[in-house]
Amino acid sequence: MAVLWSTACERPRPEHGQWMDDPLPPPALVLHDSRGNAFDLAAQKGRASVLLYFGYTHCPDVCPATLADFARALRTVSDLRPKVRFVFVSVDPERDTPVSAEQYAWQFDSSFAGFAPTAPQLDSIKAAWGFAVQKETMPGMKMEDYGMLHPAGVFFIARDGLVRFVFAPGTKAEAIASDLRRLLE
């Protein structure tokens, strides 16, 4: 696989995020869907690239915009769809369930996968991936209407099992499609 990527580096790099000059394997990530089927990120190696996004279903703006833009981008590069899988992982174990995370992801694209780890699982994920999540409330807001501060980039884990790129938050569909062509062709 190293030869494959050394050749790929001669092509233009993706432009709308952070290219990893020294890519590393991602931390372990094993989750179960609402039917109990396991998703193991490590098992995707050699099969498909993964677009991994951490968000939550009650998000009023960034999460739905991100999933919508990636859905539009994937429709634009439909010839590359078999090479990539989009995975949404909830960071809100108090409100999100495996069913709600799945349904949320599916409303953007039926091929998207959605997962809702338990609070202890999320704690392990946050520690392994090195990010924080924090509840956010505003004065006068009901306790159950809180927001979540969370990472907003989308990780690109290549078929070789390495994190090669992180799409910047707010990247629009056209730019995502252009970068996916550079990453997947």
Image: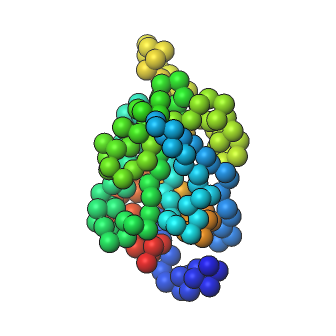
Residue at (56% x, 69% y) in the render: 46
Q: Quadrant of the C terminus?
A: bottom left
Residue at (54% x, 49% y) in the render: 39
Q: Quadrant of the N terminus?
A: bottom right
Q: Position of residue 64 (x, y in %)?
A: 36, 42
Q: Is residue 43 above or below residue 46?
A: above
Q: Position of residue 177 (x, y in %)?
A: 36, 66
Q: Position of residue 77 (x, y in %)?
A: 32, 68
Q: Tell me where residue 176 sits by quadrant.
A: bottom left
Specify whether 114 is left or right of 160: left
Q: Is residue 37 above or below residue 83?
A: above
- Colour scheme of the rendered structure: rainbow
Residue 103 visible from this viewpoint: yes
Q: Is residue 79 above or below residue 38?
A: below
Residue at (47% x, 50% y) in the render: 87
Q: How many marks?
A: 0
Q: Tell me where residue 44 sits by quadrant.
A: bottom right
Residue at (44% x, 14% y) in the render: 142
Q: Is 34 in front, or is 154?
A: 34
Q: Position of residue 168 (x, y in %)?
A: 49, 56
Residue 148 visible from this viewpoint: no
Q: Is 166 in front, or is 163?
A: 163
